[in-house]
Amino acid sequence: MSSAPGPHPFPAAAGGPGHHGPASLAALAQQLSALMTGAWITQMVRVAAELDLAGHLAAGEQAVDALARACACDPESLFRLLRALAAVGLFQETAPRRFGLTPLADLLRADHPASMRSFARLMGDEHYLAWDDLLHCIRTGEPAFGQRFGDSLFDWYQQHPERAAIFDGAMGDISRGASGPLLDALPWAECRHLVDVGGGRGALLIRLLRAHPHLRGTVLDQPTVVEGLTSPADLAERFAYRGGDFFAEVPAGADTYLLKHILHDWGDDACAVLLERIATAMAPGARLLVIEQVIPPGNDPFPGKLLDLNMLVMTEGGRERTPEQYASLLARSGLHLQRIRPTASPLSVVEAVRA
Ligand SMILES: C[S@@+](CC[C@H](N)C(=O)[O-])C[C@H]1O[C@@H](n2cnc3c(N)ncnc32)[C@H](O)[C@@H]1O
């Protein structure tokens, strides 16, 4: 699942112990109110993405009335949306009722190299609806997604290809953002052949192979995700897609296996099956690189603590894990946790070899 920092991820505490005066109480109430209304912002950004407002403004600022005609919207309501979005840094009113992009809004363009448009559409739809049942999750320990949608997440996507395409696009959005710090974090010179297990449409692996011409790689994902995809022309000799079920079989003989945002989708028993498949497939001396947000102890702000709740809501048993939880999960499948490398992003790389 996805890294999803919220609209008010970690507001600074407005008052600590001993600060209970009227001014600090007002500040606390304001801080709390911003947290309580985060869902409004999720929907504002989602609607901007659905209407492709950033795409319409890519060529330059526009008057609201013209923009409303282009997007088939009510002009006054669109004006109110843009005014509110401008108040949180997306879009700017450059003259009365005339709006243009900001650097944040620019990332909602579908053709921006760091586009986050699919992610905005994902967070505002089935994720948003499932989060409505968080109370059910906390009371029962059951996932909310199945309760609301009647199926598990990946089975539901098999039945809803138009939403699955947005999910796959959103995973690409997240991978593009994270791949820079990952590229820098590891000694890729030591690798030759990588398999990205559950690698989606291959955003991470394609970037890795382009940065390191000595590497070749395979993306394994569900047949419905990779069918019809072909290797980029510049990587035709070094890159391949493979459709399959990673719980059944993983391509054998590579020296490096990647699992990015995969283990956090599943409970420990399912992870153990997948890790055993990988342990069996690994060439002698091969490494497994598990890329996840590893939960630190204590109260410090960390986006993985929110993402962990997203896993609770959306998946059957998925979760973010601590270093100790990764060590015991890997050991259960005959793998040994060698080290955990932090990166410049919230992601860490958990490195494992066969025990
Ligand atoms: C959260 S996404 C992560 C994608 C990619 N690794 C990334 O970080 O962007 C999980 C991926 O696992 C794939 N997946 C789920 N179940 C699978 C299975 N049984 N076999 C192969 N792939 C599977 C999904 O299709 C999806 O692409």
Image: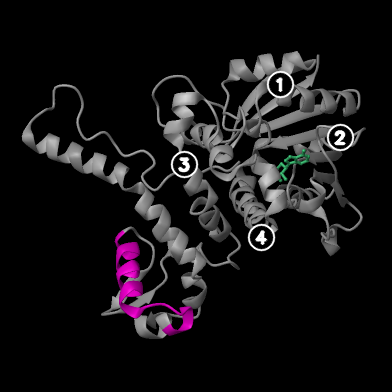
Q: Earlier in the sequence, mark 1 or mark 4?
A: 4
Residue 250: mark in rendering: 2
Disc 4 and disc 2: Cα gap in Å? Answer: 27 Å
What's under tag 1, amino acid-wise?
Asp
Q: Earlier in the sequence, mark 3 or mark 2?
A: 3
Residue 131: mark in rendering: 3
Magenta span contains residue 77: yes
Is the residue marked by circle 1 packed among few (<14), some (14-19), or many (20+) residues within 10 Å?
A: few
* Circles 1, 4 touching at the beta carbon (< 8 Å): no
Q: Earlier in the sequence, mark 4 or mark 2?
A: 4
Disc 1 and disc 3: Cα gap in Å? Answer: 24 Å
Query: Which quadrant of the figure shows ligand 1?
Result: top right
Q: Main secondary structure of the magenta part?
A: helix
Q: Is residue 6 visible?
A: yes
Write the start and end of the magenta stretch as one range.
Answer: 69-87
SS at badge 2: loop
Identity of the residue furthest to the left in this view: 22
How far across and down, in percent of the image, does residue 237 sit? 92, 55
How far across and down, in percent of the image, does residue 319 sit? 58, 28
* Circles 4, 2 touching at the beta carbon (< 8 Å): no
